Amino acid sequence: MDKTGYLILRLAIGLSMFGHGLVRLPKLSGFSKWMVKSFEGSMLPEIIVTPFSYALPVLELCVGLLLLIGLFTRQAILLGALIMLMLIFGTTLIENWAILPSQLIHVAFFVVLLNYVKDNTWALDLKLGK
């Protein structure tokens, strides 16, 4: 993969994660209530869903921002992939099969970025020696 292609992929997944977090933060309480309600019939107890629902938008925003500026890129990729794996697990528990492809695509983006992280040349990581 060339450096420009890597940058485009990093920015694309960064914008997706950043945007998810950005739109959810102003309505965090409502988002949390929606997520808790979505998991009412699942195996996951509310005591697990509630803190995750509050942390998710913050994590999405932070991962997205780090990817957009190219800072701690490898760590942001790994955290983003972990977030998506948790979302995939939750999605399967509530049998929301319609959203699963989008989550799998996000994971694929993270895997590609991780495998070609050496091409991450347009990033703050290089400027700061990370």
Image: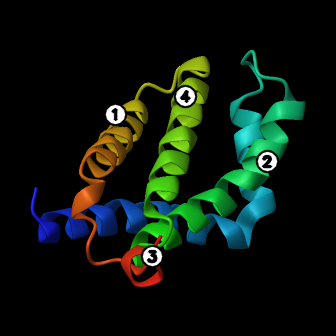
- Looking at the image, tell me whether mark 2 or mark 1 is earlier in sequence order: 2
The residue carrying mark 3 is: 129
Give the alpha-carbon distance from disc 3 to disc 1, as whole Å.
36 Å
Q: Determine the residue located farthest toward the right in the rendered image.
A: 47
Q: Where does the image place residue 102, in percent across and percent down from the top left?
A: 36, 41
Q: Give the class, few, some or many, for how many residues have Cα within 10 Å of label 1's Cα (few <14, many ≥20).
A: few
Q: Which mark is residue 37?
A: none
Q: Tell me the quarter of the picture where residue 44 sits.
A: top right
Instruction: Locate the N terminus by quadrant.
Output: bottom left
- Looking at the image, tell me whether mark 1 or mark 4 is earlier in sequence order: 4
Q: Secondary structure at mark 4?
A: helix
Q: Give the class, few, some or many, for how many residues have Cα within 10 Å of label 4's Cα (few <14, many ≥20).
A: some
- Looking at the image, tell me whether mark 4 or mark 3 is earlier in sequence order: 4
The residue carrying mark 4 is: 91
Give the alpha-carbon distance from disc 2 to disc 1, as whole Å.
24 Å
The kind of residue tagged 3 is: Gly
Q: Secondary structure at mark 3?
A: loop
Q: Where does the image place residue 15, in percent across and percent down from the top left?
A: 40, 68
Q: Determine the residue located farthest toward the front in the rendered image.
A: 129
The residue carrying mark 1 is: 101
Tell me whether circle 1 and circle 4 mark residues in contact (CB < 8 Å): no
- Asked if residue 81 is positioned above or below residue 40 in the image, the reply reads below
Which residue is pictured at 75% across the width and 62% down the height? Answer: 28
The residue carrying mark 2 is: 33
The kind of residue tagged 1 is: Pro
**Image check: 48 left or right of 39?**
right
Q: Tell me the quarter of the picture where residue 41 sits.
A: top right
Q: Where does the image place residue 67, in percent across and percent down from the top left?
A: 43, 67
Which residue is pictured at 90% across the width and 32% down the height? Answer: 47
Give the alpha-carbon distance from disc 4 to disc 2, as whole Å.
16 Å
